[in-house]
Image (cartoon, rainbow, N blue to C red):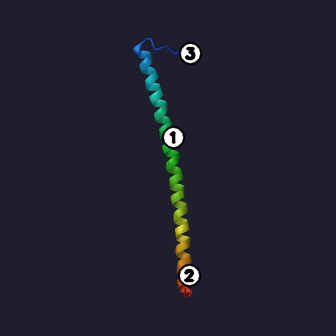
Amino acid sequence: MRNIDFSSWESLLVTLIGLALVTLIGVGIRLVVMFTIQQRRERMNRQINERLRTLIAAYKTLGG
């Protein structure tokens, strides 16, 4: 591994830009994963709600 020296402004700037880039990529990946999980949960909730509506309608039809 290379030794990191902050003796020049260029190396400090490159290091900071690199850290910012890695952080942004990490946050982006996390957002995509969270969005995907949220979409899956919403789809499951819609299916559950549809089943509940069907059960309630059947119950009312049977005179409940």
Ranked by sequence position, the earlier of labels 3 and 2 is: 3
| Mark linked to residue 58 | 2
Q: Residues within 10 Å of mark 1 (few under 14, many from 20)?
A: few
* Amino acid at circle 1: Ile
Ranked by sequence position, the earlier of labels 3 and 1 is: 3
User: Helix, strand or loop at disc 2?
Assistant: helix
Q: Residues within 10 Å of mark 3 (few under 14, many from 20)?
A: few
**Residue 45 in the image: above or below residue 62:** above
Side of 44 where 9 appears, left or right: left
Task: Tell me how far mark 3 sits from mark 2, CA to CA.
Answer: 70 Å
Circles 3 and 1 in contact, beta carbons < 8 Å? no
- For the point 48% across and 35% down, the residue is 25
**Which residue is label 3 attached to?**
2
Q: Residue furthest top?
A: 7
- For the point 54% across and 52% down, the residue is 37
Task: Tell me how far mark 1 sits from mark 2, CA to CA.
Answer: 44 Å
In terms of image quadrants, where is residue 16?
Answer: top left
* Amino acid at circle 3: Arg
Q: Residues within 10 Å of mark 2 (few under 14, many from 20)?
A: few
Image coords of residue 8 (percent x, y): 42, 12
Image coords of residue 60 (percent x, y): 53, 84
**Residue 32 in the image: above or below residue 49:** above
**Which residue is label 1 attached to?**
29
User: Helix, strand or loop at disc 3?
Assistant: loop
Q: Residue furthest bottom?
A: 63
* Amino acid at circle 2: Ala
Task: Tell me how far mark 3 sits from mark 1, CA to CA.
Answer: 28 Å
- For the point 46% across and 14% down, the residue is 6
Circles 1 and 2 in contact, beta carbons < 8 Å? no
